[in-house]
Amino acid sequence: MDDTNKLESVLVPLLSIALGLMVGAVMMLAMGYDPIAGYAALFQGIFGNAYNFGETLRAWAPLVFTGMAVAFAFRTGLFNIGVEGQFIIGSLTAAYVGAAWNLPPVLHALVAILAAMVAAGLWASIAGYLKARLQVHEVITTIMLNYIAMYTSNYLIRNYFIGHQENTPPIQPSASLEMPILSQVFDNARIHWGIFLAIVFAVLVYWLLFKTTKGYELRAVGFNPFASEYAGMNVQQNIVWSMAISGALAGVAGSGEVLGVYGYYSIQSGFSGIGFDGIAVALIGNNHPFGILLSALLFGGLSFGATSMQRLEDIPFEIIRVVIALIIFFVAANMFVKWLIGLFRRRKGQVSQQ
């Protein structure tokens, strides 16, 4: 990638965010709200005090994992819409291991996370296997697997693993990812070890994708499966591996929410949306693990800070969701943003010549 492309890879998301915020401000004005006060409330909701910033970090961690799950599939030529379902499978598995198994502290939490990764990875590999062997499009299978995951988990909890009310039994203290010392620093925000795991996994995913032979194979198969097969690569096996790794990352997101935030998993009446938000996080982060660390912070901040916009300025929560959607729109329509950058460069060149 030359210097121009590198600059554009940074400028396009930043300009998309700016355009999304500007159009969102126009919408707020049109609806009779003060956009400056609204964004000030949003900023206060994210950075106003230690608790708010701690909760923003808490919301950031699962988005990093779901964003990386989507991005990993993108990078290997697959479109994993089933991150939400894999998130559910990971959550349920972590809740079961955390509540039903007896293991020493630390080891218990690690085993619960590993079990969630394996279960979610196997769940995702169903779509990978169908894609590899039968050419069933992964978009269709992963969407359907989302619903199967939610209703199956509800059935299992209600009939075999019910605890208090409509929750699983609480996890044992030995499986907890809570971090009381750091939580006290952030005024009892629900911050946990998952934020450090998110950084570690971002480095691991970057290393796997861009620094290993296996990562090169996975990306090559996604880029051109026919050329990869001609070069001697096992295309079918690599497709299954791609989906399994993508699903495993989503499983970590689910385990973090169960072990670090809630301590149980509930019967769900609908999707949490964290898995679907991962698609936006991956797009804004340019499908790069380090870009996702930043885009998840933006997304988590907007989502959590939106409550302050509603509380302080009486701006409906839906407005901030529209702003997020506009940001994603401009990222997806990046040709428009690139056209704006090109227009600016041409005018700058004309001024220089004069």
Image: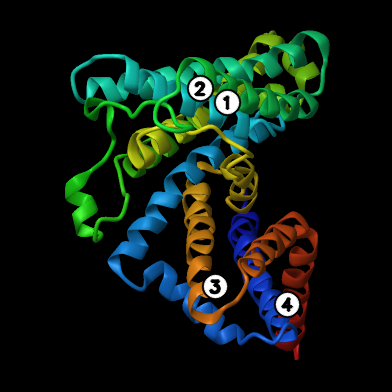
Name the image quarter holding the C terminus: bottom right
Say which mark, if any, is on residue 154: 1
> Disc 2 designates what residue?
157
> Disc 3 designates what residue?
310
In the rendered image, the vertical position of residue 308 relative to residue 243, given as above or below: below
> Mark 3 or mark 4, which has the lower sequence index?
3
Query: Decide: marks 1, 4 in contact (CB < 8 A)?
Result: no
- Amino acid marked by disc 4: Phe
- Amino acid marked by disc 1: Asn
Question: Distance between the Cα atoms at labels 3 and 1?
Answer: 32 Å
Question: Distance between the Cα atoms at labels 1 and 4?
Answer: 54 Å
Query: Decide: marks 2, 4 in contact (CB < 8 A)?
Result: no
Viewer-proximal residue among 316 and 46 = 316
Instruction: Specify whether 282 is left or right of 165.
Output: right
Judged from the image, the secondary structure of the residue bearing numbered disc 1 is helix
Viewer-proximal residue among 313 and 209 = 313
Q: Quadrant of residue 346?
A: bottom right
Q: Residue at x 28, y 65 (%)?
A: 50
Query: Decide: marks 1, 2 in contact (CB < 8 A)?
Result: yes
> Disc 4 designates what residue?
344
Q: Mark 3 or mark 1, which is nearer to you? A: 1
Say which mark, if any, is on residue 79: none
